[in-house]
Image (spheres, helix red, strand yellow):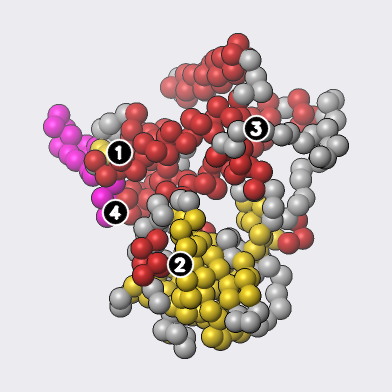
């Protein structure tokens, strides 16, 4: 038993603290690719592990909730690409839902037929050796038939974030109680928002959602018929970027645009049944995550925190309306 006074033991294993504890173990980051018929599929994964030297076996796991699950489980081969410190954008691209992951990505079939992304190494080309059930994931074991080796500075996933190896375990220094930042409300709010949201935002890939997509779904679940401008303000997004997100979500069938009956020039946004079905489990997980974060506070403290934030938000909106 550790004597670390900061260590916490738990009798019941619940998903949120379990994930938080696992997140303290730094892992590498990979992009796994395969063919689904005539189309390449790919996703970001940090579950890679070596298994055996003879025969040469490696494994990774894919969530059963992922749209990529069935194509990867059905594939007879896959390729695992290790990502370097400068590949954060690529990791984010393949961590998102969408059919355009390979757009503008130069790739070619390897010896197994699985697509190999140009410029990445190490790469392990594998034939699917075994498939095992693993709770809410499927574990895929691959026999390596060819690999490309290269030394590089790795990309690391730690505590819900992508990081370079040189700062993978670096934390913000603890500020003195009398320091400016420690007493400056804007800094405190920004830091609290970062601490509260970063882990849950990292979990959104379980539902194949990006942070902007999650914000759109959550806002429209509460208020139907928003205009793009109204949604941009509510979701804390700039309108040009939001429009691209909405275009993608409409193509994926999560929302639809309609002309308002009272003003045909006004376009309103509405969730589809598919969009509502997608957001409900995410909302439940968000509430569970919030409950875990706030359990250190009493009921009155939780109410005070939310009331104070509501007052600040209302005050800011009133000032903007008065401009």
Camera-nearest label, 4 or 3: 3
What residue is shown at x 64% (from left), y 48% (from top)? 22
Tell me the element at label 4.
Answer: loop
Q: Residues within 10 Å of mark 4 (few under 14, many from 20)?
A: some
**Range covered by the magenta-colored residues:** 250-269
Camera-nearest label, 4 or 2: 2
Quadrant in the rendering for residue 260 = top left
Asked if residue 226 lies left or right of residue 137, the reply is: left
Instruction: Point out which mark residue 252 bears.
Output: 4
Q: Is mark 3 in CB contact (under 8 Å) with mark 1?
A: no
Between discs 4 and 1, the one toward the N terminus: 4
Q: Is residue 255 magenta?
A: yes
Q: Is residue 29 visible?
A: yes
Residue 319: image x %, image y %?
A: 50, 20
Image position of 152 with respect to 305: above or below: below
Asked if residue 185 lies left or right of residue 202, the reply is: right
Report the residue marked by disc 2: 131
Q: Residues within 10 Å of mark 1 (few under 14, many from 20)?
A: some
Relative to the observer, which residue lies in front, 37 or 208?
37
Relative to the observer, which residue lies in front, 208 or 218?
208
Between discs 2 and 1, the one toward the N terminus: 2
Residue 310: image x %, image y %?
A: 52, 19
Report the residue marked by disc 3: 11
Tell me the element at label 3.
Answer: loop
Q: CA distance from mark 2 to mark 3?
A: 32 Å
Relative to the observer, which residue lies in front, 3 or 279?
3
Q: Is residue 209 magenta?
A: no
Tell me the element at label 2.
Answer: strand
């Amino acid at each position: 038993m550790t004597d670390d006074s900061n260590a916490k033991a738990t009798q019941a294993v619940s998903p949120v603290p379990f994930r938080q504890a696992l997140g303290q173990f730094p892992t590498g980051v990979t992009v796994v690719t395969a063919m689904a018929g005539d189309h390449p599929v790919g996703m970001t994964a940090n579950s890679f592990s070596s298994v055996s030297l003879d025969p040469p076996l490696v494994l990774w796991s894919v969530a059963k909730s992922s749209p990529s699950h069935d194509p990867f489980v059905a594939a007879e081969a896959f390729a695992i690409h290790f990502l370097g410190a400068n590949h954060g954008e690529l990791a984010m691209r393949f961590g998102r839902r969408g059919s355009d992951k390979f757009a503008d990505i130069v790739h070619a079939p390897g010896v197994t037929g699985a697509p190999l992304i140009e410029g990445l190494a190490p790469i392990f080309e594998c034939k699917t050796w075994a498939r095992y059930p693993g709770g809410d994931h499927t574990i895929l074991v691959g026999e390596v038939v060819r690999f490309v080796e290269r030394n590089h500075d790795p990309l690391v996933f730690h505590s819900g974030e992508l990081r370079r190896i040189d700062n993978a375990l670096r934390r913000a220094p603890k500020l003195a109680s009398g320091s400016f930042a420690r007493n400056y409300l804007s800094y405190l709010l920004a830091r609290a928002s970062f601490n509260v949201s970063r882990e849950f935002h990292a979990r959104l890939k379980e539902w194949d959602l990006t942070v902007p997509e999650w914000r759109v779904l959550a806002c429209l679940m509460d208020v139907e018929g928003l205009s793009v401008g109204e949604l941009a303000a509510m979701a804390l997004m700039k309108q040009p970027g939001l429009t691209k997100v909405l275009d993608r979500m409409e193509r994926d069938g999560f929302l639809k645009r309609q002309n308002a009956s009272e003003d045909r020039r006004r376009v309103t946004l509405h969730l589809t049944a598919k969009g509502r079905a997608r957001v409900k489990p995410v909302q439940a997980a968000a509430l569970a995550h919030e409950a875990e974060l706030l359990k250190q506070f009493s009921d009155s403290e939780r109410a005070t925190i939310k009331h104070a934030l509501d007052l600040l938000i209302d005050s800011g909106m009133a000032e903007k309306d008065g401009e």
